[in-house]
Structure formats: structure tokens, C-alpha cells
Image: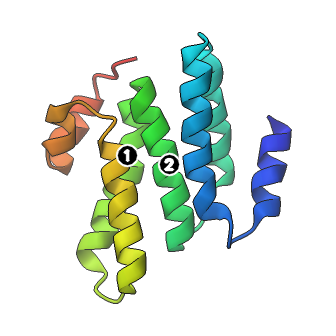
Amino acid sequence: MLQLGNAIKEVGGEGVGEIGGLLVSGVRSLRRVGLREEAGELLARASTVLKGEDVATLQARLGLASGFMYLGAFAQAQPIIDESLGRLGRESGLIIAERIKLTRATAQALSHASTELALAGPVARGAAAAVDHR
């Protein structure tokens, strides 16, 4: 797992946006072969490395949220999704291409949630996430 952190750091800013999708694919594969706990650990480790305020890092973190949702760990996904929704709502200065990418990544993360959770507002999601569906 230490190698994962080093690999993410080596990718740098221009490749960080791709990491989220790759992690979600890896999580699906691990879950398919019965390695659910290892998939959760992979996401947890990656979340400690993926830090930053830029749009590309937030997109990668939305990939993590997508993986957490896929595993039923809504409590870990919620803060990332709320951050993205908040940023989309308050930042009018985002370049349209960045806004579209961020919107798409948020929608993809929410697509792994239950319908009630995906359609709920941030307050309702907070209450639903309190009952983690692992």
C-alpha cells in the first residue's frame, strides 16, 4: 500500500484526475473476487494521499467517493460529494470544461448510491450516511 501512495505522488498534478477512475475499477475487481475489506483499505490509503484544492484532485477524490459508495461506505463518501456540490454551487469562476468534468464526476459518484441517498440534499444525505450500509 505504501507503493500506492508513492505512485500517486509520482503521477503529479496532470495525471491525478485519472487516478479516481482507476481506483474504482480496482475496487470493483477486488470486490468481485471477495476482497471487499482490501478494497476499502485501498480507498482509505488513497484518500490520505489525495489532498489538494485543485479541480483535478477533487475529481480523483470523487473517484474515491464512487468507490466508497460502491462498497456501501456512505459516511466516507459524503464529505467528498458535499465538497464538490458546494464548490459547484459557489464558484462561478470555474472554466466550463472544469465545471463539466466536476459535475460528471459527482454524478458518477452519486450513481453508486441508493436512489434515496443520491436524490437527497446534503442534510438528508448526512442523516442517511449516519447509518453506514456496509
Q: Amino acid at mark 1?
A: Ala
| Element type at mark 1 | helix
Find disc 1 in the rendering and name its residue: 109
Mark 1 or 2, nearer chain start: 2
Amino acid type at image mark 2: Gly
Viewer can see residue 77: yes
Above or below, 46 against 56 in this view is: above
* Residues marked 1 and 2 touching at CB (< 8 Å): yes
Say how many tags the image has: 2
How crowded is the residue under tag 1: few (<14 C-alpha within 10 Å), some, or many (20+)?
many
Quadrant position of residue 65: top left
Quadrant for the C terminus, please: top left
Give the Cα separation between the discs numbered 1 and 2.
7 Å
Q: Which residue is disc 2 drawn over?
A: 63
Quick check: can you spot residue 40? no
Q: In the image, is 14 to the left or to the right of 90?
A: right
User: Is 97 or 124 nearer to us in this picture?
Assistant: 97
Percent position of residue 123, x then y: 17, 46
As drawn, 102 above or below 2: below
